[in-house]
Structures are given as C-alpha cells and as structure tokens.
Amino acid sequence: MSMDINCDIGESFGNWKLGADAALLQRITTANLACGFHGGDPLTMRHTVEAAVEHGVAVGSHPGLPDLLGFGRRIMAVSPEDLHAYVVYQSGALEAFLRPHGQALKHVKPHGALYLMLNRDEDLATAVVDAMFEVMEQPVLYWPAGSEDRALLRVARDRSVVVIREFYPDSRYGSDGETVVERERLPVTPETAEAALRRFLDRGEVETLDGTTIPVAAESICVHGDGPMAVEIVDRVVAVLAELGRPLRAATAKESEDALR
C-alpha cells in the first residue's frame, strides 16, 4: 500500500538556479540527481547529496546527454560506446559523493531525450544496461509506466534488472504510452495534477493527448523538479496519498517484483 514519490533535482549549474530542491527534499522519498551533463555540477551534486541524506531521501543518478544548452532534451547522435561511458561517468561520480555518507546509488533513471532514444535503439539500451552493472551491484532502473514494449525495458528485464515503474501526474502522455518530452516544462496546475493522480490511483489509467485512455501500473509517482509549481504539486500528491491511507516510502525491489506477478 505504500507509495514512492520521486523528483528530478540537482539540475542547477553554477550561478544558474533551477528547481526548489530544498523544499522538495523535505517532501519526497526518492531523488533522481543530475550529474553534470544536462544539468548540475560537482558542487551542486555534493550539496544535494548532503541534503538528501539529511532528510532520509534515497538517491539515484539521472544521467543525460552532454547538452547543457538544450537541457538534455534534444536527441543527439551518439554511439553505444560513448553512451556507455556517459552513464558510467555520471553515475560513478554521484556514487563517489554518496560513499562518505555510507550510502550507495539506489537506481539509474535516464533523462530527457535519452529516454526517447533508449525506447527505440537496442544497441544504446544494451550499452546503458552494461553501464548500470558497472556502477551498481544490483541495478535498478526507474522507467515511465505506459511505455512497456520498449528497447531499454526489454533489455533490462532480460538481464534481471529491477524496474521501478513511474506515473507522471504533471506530464502529457502520447497514445503510444510515451510521456511527451518538452524543451521547456509547461505549467501544470496542482488541480490538473491531482485529477490525473486520482484517475491513476482509482482506475489505473491515464488520459492521452488524443483523448483516449491507456492502462498504467506503477510503484512510484514522479513530479518534475523543474516545473514551476513542483512543490505545490508534490503537496497535493502527499495529501491525496494520506487521504487514501497510502504511506510514503522509497520503492523497493521486492515491491517491483510483486507488482509483476
């Protein structure tokens, strides 16, 4: 009955600040932390890890494409060898910041346009899974619910990678089940997010852009940390879960395995 709430955070870079990380870390159970490619920098990583540990928030890596200008939301031509190195480099750096606190990397969650690329390219998907095995003893992948028949999901499950599925109350879904990757996060009101959340919790479905519905099953709820009303949306999520008697807790491998039975 428990539910995980995760956010993409740590995406500030130098003097450029993005997201209400301090407030979000007081409300969520899991953080997907940028590692310097699409956003973030070493000092931001260190400070965000310290804050996450202080609040008991589990931390995973949020590796992206080397695209600060486009915030990792532009598809790029990269080789499997390059992508393998990108994921090891980013996730390994984050793991090094976690180690002094006695913490380990909880999961890997690809960011932005990389998600779309991994949906379609088996060779890139294999490279990412290989990289996960190099940075984690038991790889765990966070992946959007609804996009089930996709390259990375197939490769991950073939290799016994634990998959934690996510529902996004603040995102738009295509009829194919993919979440829409936007260059700039569009405003979503807490009321709209709450309606989508209740539909997911009550009926196990989400409405798509063309007005149809698709089934979704997930162990985690993701709210994007760069959204203009991220804190207010998380507060609505917390309130709805409390109303329904659903305690907050970081997702576990066992819960993912039970959900697949």
Image (tube, helix red, strand yellow):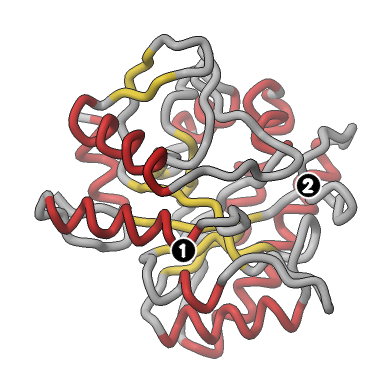
Residue at (39, 44) in percent of width and height: 164
Identify residue type, mark 1.
Val
In the depicted structure, whether residue 217 falls above or below residue 177: below
Q: Residues within 10 Å of mark 1 (few under 14, many from 20)?
A: many
17 or 47, nearer to the observer: 17
Residue 259 visible, this orientation: yes
67 relative position to 44: left or right? right
State the SS at label 2.
loop
Residue at (44, 55) in percent of width and height: 138
User: Residue 231: which numbered mark, if any?
Assistant: 1
Picture quadrant where residue 207 is located: top left
In the depicted structure, whether residue 240 falls above or below residue 150: below
Q: At which x and y percent is residue 158?
A: 47, 29
Q: At which x and y percent is residue 228?
A: 59, 56
Q: Quadrant of the C terminus?
A: top left
260 or 160, nearer to the observer: 260
What whole-number distance in Å separates the C-alpha atoms at marks 2 and 1? 23 Å
Determine whether label 2 and label 1 are within 8 Å by CB.
no
Q: Residues within 10 Å of mark 2 (few under 14, many from 20)?
A: many
261 or 130, nearer to the observer: 261
Residue at (20, 39) in percent of width and height: 258
Residue at (30, 31) in percent of width and height: 217
Name which of mark 2 and mark 1 comes first in the sequence: 2
Residue located beneath label 2 in the image: 72
22 or 142, nearer to the observer: 22
Picture quadrant where residue 37 is located: bottom right
In the depicted structure, whether residue 155 falls above or below residue 103: above
Q: At which x and y percent is residue 74?
A: 82, 37
